[in-house]
Amino acid sequence: MTDLSARLCRMSPRVDALPLSSSTLSSPASHVPKAIRRVRWGVAAVLATALLAGCGGSDDNTAASGGQDSAGTTVTGVVVGSYFANARVCLDSNGNGRCDGGEPSTRTDDNGRFTLTGSAAGVVAEIGTDATELDPATGQRTAVSAPLVLRAPSQATGVVSLHSTSVVAAMQLQGLSFEAARAAVALAVDVPDASVLADFNRESDAAVRQRLQQASNDGLQRIAQALADAGSSADVVAVVNEAARADRYYQTKAPYRAPQDATAYEAPPSGFTPVYTEMVARHGSRGLSSLKYDLAVYNLWQQAQADGALTPLGQRLGDDVLAIMKANFLLGYGVAGISTPGYGNETQVGIREHQQLAVRLLQRLPAYWQQVAADGSRQIQVVSSGVDRAVDSANFFVGSLKTAQPALATRIVYPKAPAPYPDTGTAVAQPDGTDRFLLYFHKLDKKTDAVTNTNDARYVTYQDSLAYQAYKKKDADLLAKQANLMTGAQATAAGRAVLARLFTSAFIDKIASGTYTFANTGTMSFTSSDGQFSPTLSGDGATVIDSLGAAGSLLYELYVIAPAMRDEAGVDFAPYMPADDAQVFAELNDASDFYDKGPGMTEKGEATYKMAQILVDDLFNEVDAIARGDRSHAAKLRFAHAEIMIPLASRLGLKNVLQQVPLNQDYSYATNPWRGEYVSPMAANVQWDVYADASGRLIVKMLYNEKETDFQAACDGARVAGTRSFYDYAALKTCYGHRPA
């Protein structure tokens, strides 16, 4: 055994691996060989030899002897990416994550299958460069180019995969039960619990299969790269553990997680049928909003390169920042339905989010939509903020409705925009289907939206918007809370930890001391592959790196946007942002959002969400019309932004959302349930389904992110007896103090 092999074999026993992210499978060949193409092959090959041949285990296809109960449990299973052949598999009797001598082991057959006999234990699969992978879709067999280690818990040994490995990791790292770990991983991959540990190559639901394959593909790449980067003296278990984390902390940039089982929705009481539905939705997953974080980080990286201050991992950062920058410059170019290419647009992930959201709306109320299609008198109203990504989301959603049910095409209407505004001087015309007061109330502007007539129904909203904007810019308590977030000890420590993986300590110290500061200054230009689109943009210098916390937070911003841009940029920033540090920056970002657009400080009252009253009123007003017998509207679909969804959730008083914090205390995950990833992920949505009986009585169900959700606690008395999710509309309206318009 070589010295390197001996060192690797003495490493910590736990091996856990599965990042749950999002590389797109562009072809059958995009499994392991393509996924791990970027690793440094020399290190990978050495690690493969040390890991898979030098730790005392049998290297043949027979169960090893050495004290095992050969008459014990028989385990049959399969090792999947596609299917791994000639992978070494063992019953991990001592729980050290290795196939040791004395543990029953074997090699998988050409189809990735194995049989082992011995005492009940979890399963380990060591996949070396002598293994191959069979793609069942094409029959293509490719060599594994870098080593992998996968595990399965003793409770579910039939399929050894990245997903089973993640379940083991969740059990060990978070202390979860098997059932809780499986549920957590299923949630992270966005699939049903029953599917996450199955052979996803045989999954009948195409969407579920794709998500499992994408997560698997991304995980294989991350583990292979992490092992290759680790070097001969690294703790391989620690390296793989970090690559395995399922809890990635994407905050409000989290791609949307759709519910998996529409049949689980509670049925309405007997005699009630759907008569109306309405929705408010955030736009889908997008790219960066402007040339800010990427340019500032790139300027920092260029200085480190000039100083010779890059670590091996840091050397890769520059290319990845440029890749995500270029993807944002060109975002939406050549994509049908994107208004103007460039920063801020929806990505392919975001487009699919709204297309699929529309399909599920039809599936949830199938008989209702057939009635709407047959009844030529009812309208589906579509309204947005007028901002490109909200307009585009509306168009993709509506296009999906029309594709799924063409007869609805003639029912779509775009109401006239509120006018004339400003109400003094020259009015600014807005396109049909635009309502800034309703869906952009956080940024109403005197040039386009001024309301001076106190009798105008929108006067209060305009004043509330101005008050909110003044609060954000001038409130001393808010500014103090915000200023302390990225300069505190927590942010500083996390920032140093992130930077230490990328740059030398001397370079980091220059940032900490203020010797080095960076900003989004300079001009960049990129050209599309067809040579027809060459945007040039300059940074405004307003996004500054002047502390370790600021540096870490801007890297975090690139980390959280990468999953939404997997189709366009194809980069993974997880290697640059360990999950523990991502959690720190997620909490700090949540704190910032909590204070300036969420529930906020107790002493500030409704400063952050009073302006959302117009939207709450609009939800009720639509149902009021149904109650009056006016059924001209079949649905109202509204498309907006996080800055609308977050105040709306507070104004509705949703449980675990409206929990303010006193000025003398600080928001934290430990003391407050508010989470941006729940309140406003990409494509976040509120939907109300309205039902009526023969007498005309109305009941309402609310869905938040397509999950049945309670109205504010004070309205529990309005819940229909014997139901979980239905509320008597008359009682609900009284509870909220709504008065018909």
Image (spheres, grey):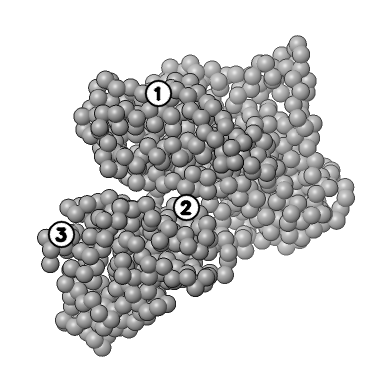
Above or below: residue 403 compared with residue 95: above
Element class at badge 1:
strand
Identify the residue position indicated by label 1 in the image.
519
Identify the secondary structure beneath mark 2: loop
Q: Amino acid at mark 3?
A: Leu
Q: Residue at x 44, y 52 (%)?
A: 21
Residue at the location (64% across, 34% down)? Answer: 340
Q: Residues within 10 Å of mark 3 (few under 14, many from 20)?
A: some
Residues under labels 1 and 2: Cα distance?
Answer: 30 Å
Residue type highlighted by circle 2: Ser
Disc 2 or 3, which lies upstream in sequence? 3
Residue 115's label in the rendered image is: none
524, above or below 97, in the image: above
Q: Earlier in the sequence, mark 3 or mark 1?
A: 3
Say whether residue 547 is left or right of residue 423. Answer: left
For discs 3 and 1, the disc positioned in front in the rendered view: 3
Task: Identify the residue shown where x is 62% and y is 31%.
Answer: 612
Disc 2 marks which residue?
22
The answer to which of 134 and 437 lies nearer the viewer is 134
Seen from the viewer's position, the closer of residues 523 and 432 is: 523
Farthest residue toward the bottom?
A: 71
The one nearer the camera, 92 or 669, is 92
Q: Nearer the viewer, mark 2 or mark 3?
A: 3
In the image, farthest residue toward the top? 425
In screen coordinates, is 157 left or right of 203?
left
